[in-house]
Image: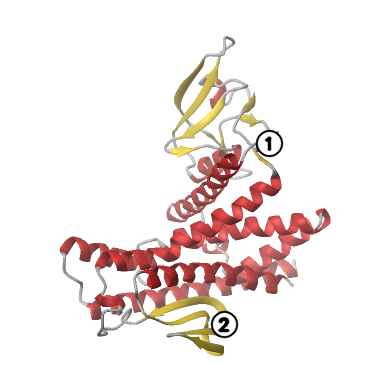
Amino acid sequence: MSIILAIIIFSFIIIFHELGHFLVAKKCDVKVNEFCLGLGPTLLHFTKGETTYSLKLLPFGGSCAMLGEDEDAEGDRAFNNKPVFNRIAVVAGGPLFNFLLAFLLSLVIVGCAGGFYEPVVVGVEKGYPAEQVGILPGDVITKVNHRSVHSYRDLTPYLTAHPHQDVTITWKHTDENGKTEKRSAKITPVYIDRTGQSMIGVRFDATLQKITNPAQLVVQSVYEVEHWIGYVFDSIHLMFVGKVTADDISGPVGIVTTIDHTVEQAASAGKTVVAVVLMNFAVLLSANLGVMNLLPLPALDGGRLVFLIIEAIRRKPIDREKEGTIHAVGMIVLLVLMVQVCLQTIILVHVRLKC
C-alpha cells in the first residue's frame, strides 16, 4: 500500500512539474513533441494534436520533450530558435509550478486545520540565552538572522542547521501600556548533544489561532510553503557543512519507508488525518523538487537557466554541443548518485529490520 501511495504522490508532483514546462512552452508557441510520466520503455501512449502523451515503465521522473530542446532544429516553433527570455520562462516553469502545487496543497492543509500557530513566547528557561538578552513571556519572535519567523516551527530547524553560530534574534515586545517596540540581540544558542538541536531557551504558545477570513488563509498558506522551502535550504546547508551523511539521505526506497511509518502512526486518528499528513508530505516533496531543480547543477533546470542567463548577458548562445555534453555528464552523475542512495537506503532498512 505504501508503495502505491508513494507512486501516486511522486507521479502527481512530477506531472505538475512537467505541466509547468508544458503550459509555458505552449504559451510561448514552442512545439511539444512528447509529454511523459516515468522513464524507460513506453507502456501506454496516445497522440492528441501535435503532442504524444505517454506512460513509461519506471515511475520516477518525467519529461516535456520540446522540438529543438537538445538539438538544433529549424522553424519558428523550435525551442532553440525562441528568444532567450522565452526559453528562460519555459525552463523556470517547472520549478515554479512545484511551488504553486505546494501552495495549493497548503491551502487545503491550513483550511482543514482551521488555524495557525504564532511564535508567541509563553516561557523562558533560566540560564539560557533568551533570558540573558531580555526576552519575556508575551514577546513575539519575528526573525532569526535574515529568516522570517511566522510560526514556532520556523525557529528550531534554522538554529539546528547553524550549530555553534551566533544568531541575531528579532522580537516584538509590548509593555503594560500597550506600546509595542521591536528589539533584537545577537546570541549564541545552546547546542544539545543528545538531540542534535540548538536552543535559545524559549517555550511557545501551542494554542491554535483561528483563521477569520480568506485573505488570512492565503497568507498562512504562503507562510506554510515558505516554512518548507526554508526547511529544504536548511537541509542543504547541513549537507554542505557535513552534518548530514549519505546514511541520512533517503532515496525513493527511504521515502516509501517514511510514508509507511507516517501512515501507520496517523491511521488511528482516522482517514482525514492520514490524508492531511500525506498532503503535508507532498508539500515538502514538491517544495524540495522546486528548490533542488533550481540549483545551478548540470542536467537540472537550474543548470539550464545558468546557461540561458549567460547567453542573455553575452547576447550570444553557448556552443550547444558543449552544453549538451555538460548536461549529459551531469545526468549520469545524478543517476549514479540516485542509485547509490537507493542501495544505501535498502541496506539500512534491511539492517533495521534484522535488529
Marks 1 and 2 sit apart, C-alpha to C-alpha, by 43 Å
Report x, y in % for residue 114: 69, 43
Q: Which residue is mark 2?
A: 58
One can see residue 314 in this view: yes
Give the residue at x 16% y 65%.
315
Give the residue at x 62% y 38%.
213
Mark 1: amino acid:
Lys
One can see residue 347 in this view: no
List the single residue furthest toward the front.
49
Quadrant of residue 24 within the rendered picture: bottom left
Is 185 above or below relative to 101?
above
Quadrant of residue 58 within the rendered picture: bottom right
Quarter in which the N terminus is drawn: bottom right
Q: Secondary structure at mark 2?
A: strand
Q: How many marks?
A: 2
Of circles 1 and 2, which is in front? 1
Report x, y in % for residue 86: 30, 66
Residue 229 located left or right of residue 217 = left
Q: Which residue is mark 1?
A: 210
Give the residue at x 68% y 36%.
210
Is 269 above or below relative to 70?
above
Q: Secondary structure at mark 1?
A: strand
Is 121 above or below relative to 1?
above
Q: Nearer the viewer, residue 310 or 146?
A: 310
Mark 2: amino acid:
Leu
Label number found at residue 201: none
Quarter in which the C terminus is drawn: bottom right
Report x, y in % for residue 66: 37, 79
Residue 331 located left or right of residue 104 = left
Report x, y in % for residue 199: 57, 35
